[in-house]
Image (cartoon, grey):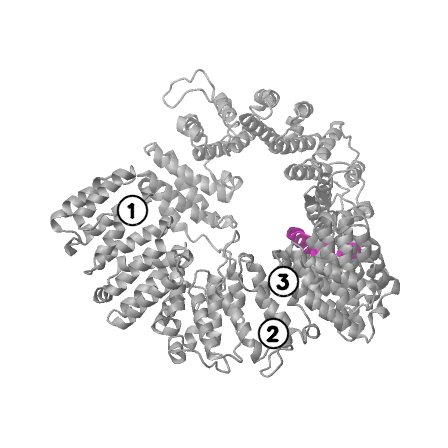
Amino acid sequence: MAVDEEMEMQETGEMGRAEDDVGISCTLDMFREHEEVRQMMGSIEKAVKNQYTAEKAFEDFKTILDNYQEQPHLLDPNLEEMLKQLVDITRDPTNKSEVVSQAFKYLWLVVKVRGYKTIVRKLPHEVKDLLPVLQMLESPEGSSDFYETYVLLLWLSIIVYMPFNMMGFDATTAGGEQQSGALVVERLLSVIKTHLKSGQKSREMAAYLASRFITRPDLKNKYLPEFIEFCFEVLETVVQGDLNGVFHKLGVLRAMGLIFKHGKREELLPYSQNVLSRLIGCKALTSTDAPVRKLSMKLVQRIGLTFLKPRVASWRYQRGSRSLAMNIQGKATEGQDASEVAEEDEEEVVGEIEEVIDSLLLGLKDKDTVVRWSSAKGIGRVTGRLPQEFGDEVVGALLELFSTRESDKGWHGGCLALAELARRGLLLPERLPAVAPVIDKALVYDELRGQCSVGSNIRDAACYLCWAFARAYHPEQIYPYVNQLATGLLIVTLFDREIPCRRAASAAFQEHVGRQGTFPHGIEILTTVDYFAVGNRSNAFLNLSVQVGRYPEYTQPLIDHLVDKKVQHWDSAIRELAAKALHNLTALAPEYMSKTVAPLLLNQTTGSILVNRHGSILALANITHALSLVASKEGKTLPDMMDKEILDGIAKIVSTLEERKLYRGMGGEYMKQATSVLIEKCSLAAAPFHGQEVVDQWHNLLENCIVYVDENIRATALEALTPFWTTYFEPTSPEKMKSKDELITKYTQALNTDKEIQSLGFASAIGRLTHSLVLGKFDIVLEALIGATEITRTTATWAQTRKEAINAILRLVETVGIKKDGKACDQVCEANLSSIYQALLRSLDDYTMDRRGDVGAWVLSIAVVSEDVTLLTGEIVGEMMSRICQQAVERIDRTRKVAGTAFSTLLYSSPSLSHIPNLEELKAIFTKEICEQMNWASEKDTFHVFIQLLDFPAYRSRVLLGIAYSAGGISANLSRYTSEAIHSYLNARAEKTDYLSSFLEAILQLFASHQKVDRITLPLIKTVGDLLSSSAVLDPVLEQEDSYTSRLITALRKECFRSADYHKLSAFITVLCELLRMNSSASKACLTQLSLFLGFQYPKVRAISATSLLTALQDYSDQEIVPEEHLEEVTDILEETEWMHNIEDARKQRNRLCELMGITPPQPKKN
């Protein structure tokens, strides 16, 4: 007792310490919802009162148990109690069918989570349950309800397994009536056969029940042959392709497979030969349905095991120790060689085994992975019972799969089978010399088939084979192949295209390091190329490869693999990454790169295969640049590192490609991109081609590429321009000065064109001009770029060109610098600063729309971030701040974010930016804390702050313009927060009529300055209508000053004159109907305009006018909009007239309304 108390106290103390150090974990420690689950099972009667509560209870039960899907063993302490409680409910005859059905659903969930093999052992297995369970299965409910059927079949499988006299049961039911003379055995067989053709999972339980029932000692002699015959009748008669027939085939194949698995070998052996021959004869192994072929393979391997006595092969290889800790410490015991095993007894192998092996080998080449995997496991199981001589023949047959004549399916199946043999100790060390070359080839197997590649599954299976080697062999047996395996796995880990393959290779490498402990620098490399690090392909190629390449054992193999495989890879992205990886690895082996790799790549740069040319040019370019960096560190030049023949060959690449016309067609795009990279890298490496003809060839090529339609080619060429000009176009002589002038003239004149792609390309290229080229010509270049930012009839949709022109201006400003008293031809100064900012500010009005959407936002984002706080006049600062505020409240969130960030930066710039209008008021609204925490992209956060700037005349017009534009957006949230911001602003100033008057004046000015600009006026009309309909805050100003109402109606009338836009007209009608409530002379003008719409040519406009006017008359009946004595008749006409029908009838009714309302009816125009 004392010891127990002491142990209990110790455990309590440990638990207390554990509670103090609780961490976050994804694992569970116990079945915590046990009590809740018990209550749910006890309240089934309440849960099934209606369908909704029953389904909700099922989902709640499912949600709880699904949490234990990955740790089902946590249910075990409470499993028997749960099963007993649910089984008792199903046994109780007084329970309703709904209650029993719900209990079976719960049981099915328990089976799904814990697994049927565990549950079946814990179900009640008394003989008295046989008939009740059978009767439930035979009932209509039991045969139709999936959950009930599944659980009952599982329950029966343990009941029939009990040792009792099955033939002693008679055919009587509980009531004592006979069932057509059928025995219980026959009833059971009937149930099994019925459910074997089910399309649900109950088919699998029926097969499991059959395997337990048919193999009973008292039934096997009579019913086993009959059942096998029944199965083959199904396989031989069912038409291939019939869906229900496929399910039936799956059922009988699974049943026979389980029979040969669970039955005794001696009892099944007499039937094995017949089953095998008939199975092959019915062509189940070559069925078009993969599940049928898979189950057929399982049955074949089970038949093969029946032919052989169960034993562990005495010749198999056995490792002396499998302790991971001992391997790390170098204390692993000696492995037991097969030659040291006692000579095994001679045993005759029947001829059918050869047929079994042939079928399994054929399955290794199946087109579906599940079939190949099943065949591989069958090969392993059967070989484990064969004598050594036959086992070695199997290995030889597997090695024949790894030939160029075999398909990728055979390679994959062969890898899986070899891994199974190695895992079971059946691949003897003597076979390793033959298997090692196969692994090398499988690890890099990659083949292009049409538009996709094959081989990723082979590489993954090869990694599994390497993993199996680590667990199967003693380090001494693997030692001769350590470098080969380590290099192969690292190549896949670092350079494979697919994430699963890289991670599989990393896992196999880790297994070898842990269990073998012989991989060079294993621990150091393992911490580098772990599971997560290799998940990013670029990181693996460009960073991890360098860290691994530092170890001399791996440097050259990594380089060789990139050159031999990845530079010529079918995927262009892999070729580009391989070239960059070679650049990074060059510093580790510069001599090998220059003497061996570079000549090899140079020979392939002008070959006939496109991918080889593309990859080789990219790789050679990157190696050349890397060698120049190594040379500069050592105080040498590039010619010191590379042979003259190599440099001469590089110079001839472009001319050779042009002579062979390889720049044409689809392959020409790859060549243009690759040679652009070559030019860039050679320029960065300062290759000694100055004054040679190749420089002009390169320049012409780049100029052709910058106006190419493909964006990637343009971008690559533009990246090459700056280093190319820097290296080869420095104006150091009169001739080069003349070339410079010609270059500037050519590029600036190219902007004046009617081809968008040409203007786009040369605008981008001008931005890459070097300081020496633009010096003395900055004013000319700037004028041309500013001209490219202007919107003309020809360039109206060239938003991307204007974006690149703005970007080019910013690049050049950074290149030449800013000096207040500088020269306009050399740098930014007071003379040209104003024109730069005018171009930037003008770009803020770019709202170009095309098929790509609001592409003008590209220009907005560039322009907003470009503001420089130096040398700014008050006029520019005021205009700049107001326009930025406008962008901060417009539709596009990314533009709002850029504008808001720019606004806060300028507001709190250091040194402080002078001339900002209302600076102190702005800082009071936008405090530093607010600016730091603000999400500028969120309309919810920003609109209610920026709306306050309507108080200040310097910002009012622009902010209101942006707010109105956002109000017309298609986003519900945008419209909502815009409306909320406007209403909150006006309500806060309801007593300040001067602010409200200024607000109305700003709206009228926007109508006047943006007439017929639907982008602005349509949302503005909607905003006015929303304000008038949902708030009366503007009513006092409108009633006090009639001129606002009359000016507003006049402005709207001009805007909608001859308009056919239904949305604009309906918004105008809404405003007119809201203005009717004003006690002013303008109400007559509103009625007159509405009468025009009542006789409008479009039916929808007439209908919306009548509906809106009727609503206004009813809402504002106290305002005497029409004479009271005519109000009822006016209302009747508006309600009863069919405004969507004949226009003449509608106009007659309209004229009658005009008479009743006291206005002059509209008169038709005279020709």
- Residue at 16 percent across and 56 percent down: it is 1119
- Residue at 43 percent across and 31 percent down: it is 129
- For label 2, the SS is helix
**Is there a contact, CB below 8 Å, between mark 1 and mark 2?**
no
Q: Which residue is mark 2?
A: 813
Return the residue found at the far front: 1167
The answer to whether one can see residue 801 in this image is yes
Side of 682 relative to 15 (left or right): right
Q: Is residue 1122 above or below residue 888?
A: above
Report the label total.
Answer: 3
Mark closest to the chain's N terminus, 1 or 2 = 2
Q: Residues within 10 Å of mark 2 (few under 14, many from 20)?
A: some
Q: Is residue 1153 above or below residue 761?
A: above
Task: Examine the structure image and report whether residue 282 is included in the region drawn in magenta.
Answer: no
Q: Nearer the viewer, mark 1 or mark 3?
A: 3
Q: Nearer the viewer, residue 523 or 616?
A: 616
Please tell me the numbered disc located at residue 1104. Answer: 1
Task: Give the magenta range.
Answer: 481-508
Main secondary-structure element of the magenta-colored stretch:
helix
- Residue at 37 percent across and 20 percent down: it is 176
Q: Which residue is mark 3?
A: 751
Give the alpha-carbon distance from disc 3 to disc 2, as whole Å.
19 Å
Side of 100 relative to 686 (left or right): left
Give the alpha-carbon distance from disc 1 to disc 3, as whole Å.
51 Å
- For label 1, the SS is helix
Q: Is residue 257 above or below residue 34?
A: above
